[in-house]
Image (tube, grey):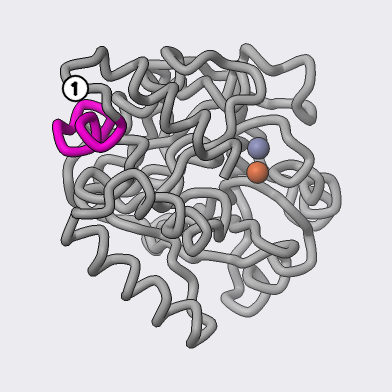
Amino acid sequence: MPLEIVTIPCLSDNYAFLAHDPVSGETALIDAPEAAPILAALESRGWQLSHALLTHHHPDHVDGLFDILAKHPARVIGAKADEHRLPELDQAVAEGDTFYIGGDLVEVLDVSGHTIGHIAFHMPETGAAFTGDSLMALGCGRLFEGKPAQMWASLGKLAALPDETIVCSGHEYTQSNAKFALTIDPDNAALQDRVADINRARAAGEPTVPSVLALEKATNPFLRAADPAIQAHLGMENADPTSVFAEIRARKDRF
Ligand code: ZN
Ligand code: FE
């Protein structure tokens, strides 16, 4: 049975998520940018946290955890590779590890690139992936620690998930990502349609996260480095997709 997903805006442009199993009552938090909105979301639903899942160590993903745990003593799960720089973990996980939230399986993917040790959580029965600052709506995280080849491989793992997967990413960067995406893939009709939807949603104050993986695959330039139209637009016909991805990421850093 799928878990109920709640999106919680935090700080200026972060998102945290709750994944709640109505049968067992177990509730997982994914990332903890700040305590107040997360505590309010739990309280308004009468939910008690059972798990806290961390995608990576950056302050805007963990700083709220301490105050949340004071009221919700949950099991903290994060990357074994980052144990030294994450809040204290109850369970250290690596790629291929699995665990359960209520009756639903959670699979751990290593999606290093933004940081080394960044993980994503895939819930196949719920059809959701919590990607933090790896795959984002129309974007991907900046490469603070990893190399382009590593991020390209990480994005490939996420792109291989089922098309209908809901991508729960860590930031509302979509509108600025959209402006950039149009410079890379200007003739993509699906992208043009999506940008119109994004502009409408943001004008109405609505979030653009989560998104659907099939739409990311059709419109997100960071997943489309092997696309002939993008390669031609960049003057990189038949180039290795890793080097095309590196070029797209470098252009975004200058954008
Ligand atoms: Zn980050
Ligand atoms: Fe972040």
The percent position of residue 206, horizontal first and vertical second, equals: 48, 79
Q: Nearer the viewer, residue 234 or 111?
A: 234
The stretch drawn in magenta includes residue 225: yes
Looking at the rendered image, the quarter that the N terminus falls into is bottom left
Magenta residues (range):
224-234
In what element is the residue under mark 1?
Answer: loop
Residue shown at 74%/46% (left/top)?
60
Characterize the local packing of mark 1: few (<14), some (14-19) or many (20 or more) Cα atoms within 10 angstroms. Answer: some
Q: Quadrant of residue 116?
A: top right
The percent position of residue 49, horizontal first and vertical second, equals: 62, 54
Asked if residue 98 shows in the view, the reply is no
Residue shown at 18%/33% (left/top)?
227
Question: Circle 1 is placed at which residue position?
Answer: 237
Q: Quadrant of residue 150?
A: top left
- Residue extending furthest front? 235
Q: Nearer the viewer, residue 19 or 168?
A: 168
Looking at the rendered image, the quarter that the C terminus falls into is top right
The percent position of residue 132, horizontal first and vertical second, equals: 54, 41
The stretch drawn in magenta includes residue 227: yes
Residue shown at 57%/16% (left/top)?
146
Q: Quadrant of residue 242?
A: top left
Horizontal arrangement in the rendering, residue 117 relative to residue 136 (left or right):
right
